Amino acid sequence: MNKPFYKAANAVIKMYAWRQEHASEKCPAHSKSEIHLVCKALNDIALSAAYAAHADEAIEILQLTSDWPMGKSPEFFPLESAGVPA
């Protein structure tokens, strides 16, 4: 099953991880402002998913944006279904 919004969210999470690897004193890793920025980007993707009638993806992405600032580490979204294809 095609999950374009999970793919976009994964790209944002991957960029966040890259930015944390290249953090500096000026831009420290895992700062509140960095987490806020990435959550805003993910929220925009979730809103687009909802508008495009991808409710499941929208809900999961929105859940991540509320959990992340509370300390839950992000995980990549699955791009393939674990179910048996028809």
Image (cartoon, helix red, strand yellow):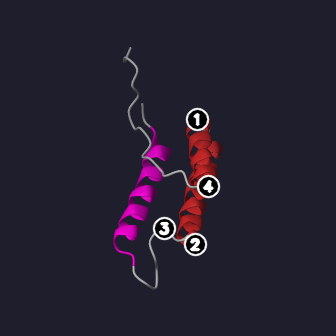
Please determine whether, in this image, residue 75 is positioned above or below residue 54.
below
Q: Which residue is pictured at 43% across the width and 51% down the height?
A: 10
Q: Which residue is pictured at 42% across the width and 30% down the height?
A: 1
Within 10 angstroms of label 3, few (less than 14), some, or many (20 or more) residues?
some
Q: Mark 4 points at which residue?
A: 70
Q: Mark 1 points at which residue?
A: 56
Q: What residue type is labelled 4?
A: Met
Residue 39: tell me if it is visible.
Answer: yes
Main SS of residues in magenta: helix
Residue 25 at what x, y percent from top left?
A: 43, 84
Q: For the magenta stretch, what is the residue range?
A: 3-23
Q: Name the residue under label 2.
A: 33
Q: Which of the two discs, 2 and 3, sits closer to the camera?
A: 3
Q: Which of the two discs, 4 and 2, sits closer to the camera?
A: 4
Asked if residue 6 lies in the magenta stretch, the reply is yes
Asked if residue 22 lies in the magenta stretch, the reply is yes
